[in-house]
Amino acid sequence: MKNVVNNHPLVKANITSVLAAIIIEALLIMILLNGSIYIIFQYPLNLALIALIIIGIAAYKFYLNALNHSRSIMKNLSPVSLILASLSIPLVYTSYEQMSPVLIVLAYVVEAIVGIYLYKELQSIHPRYAQLFILGMYSFVFSLPLLVLSQIYIIIPLIGNVLKAGGLIGLAREVGV
């Protein structure tokens, strides 16, 4: 019987990132249904944010083991992203609660910088899946600030997140799931 999850670190990293994408989709849908980005900082949805940070740490470790050329940029910048995201959760309970979504967006912008280098490395595995990944990631990341203006824009990060996950799944399959 074939092992469902290949032992290759890139497969583990991508599957971990797809798990995060599923949770993110659920949070985006909750924002859409509630009409406010601040819903994700309230109990019990704030537990999903904590889970995303834990998943982010796992993905970070898997990607470090899987990457060659982009390892150093990831090693230096991804912890910054994880710290920014972590700070957003307790900040919502202070008088600076409006800064929580800003920190989340900043965390993703830092990840987008890492994503450029990751994309370059993933192209050698499968150019189309790597393009799908980067297109989805940038659609997701750079549309998040629009949610402050109106919840109607939520369709953009929803679609971007799905595209990113599709690219990651395709890349994992190419490596060996």
Image: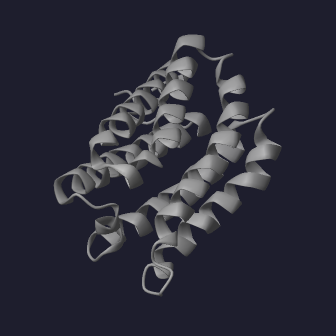
Give the percent coordinates (x, y) of residue 99. 52, 71
Whether residue 58 is visible, yes or no, is no
Q: Name the residue: 17% across, 54% down.
A: 33
Of 76 and 38, the residue lying toward us? 38
Give the percent coordinates (x, y) of residue 168. 48, 30
In the rendered image, the vertical position of residue 122 relative to residue 118, given as above or below? above
Of 8 and 151, the residue lying toward us? 151
In the rendered image, the vertical position of residue 102 relative to residue 158, given as above or below? below
- In this figure, what is the number of numbered marks? 0
Q: Residue furthest front?
A: 149
Q: Name the residue: 52% across, 60% down.
A: 104
Q: Residue furthest bottom?
A: 94
Q: Is residue 177 left or right of residue 138?
A: left
Quarter of the image with the C terminus is top left
Q: Is residue 86 left or right of residue 140?
A: right
Instruction: Give residue 31's quadrant in the image.
Output: bottom left
Q: Name the residue: 56% across, 64% down.
A: 103
Quarter of the image with the N terminus is top left
Give the percent coordinates (x, y) of residue 118. 68, 33
Q: How is the image coloured?
A: one colour
Instruction: Give residue 131's quadrant in the image.
Output: top right
Q: Name the residue: 40% across, 55% down.
A: 148
Of 135 and 52, the residue lying toward us? 135
Of 169 and 162, the residue lying toward us? 162
Whether residue 56 is visible, yes or no, is yes
Give the percent coordinates (x, y) of residue 172. 50, 27
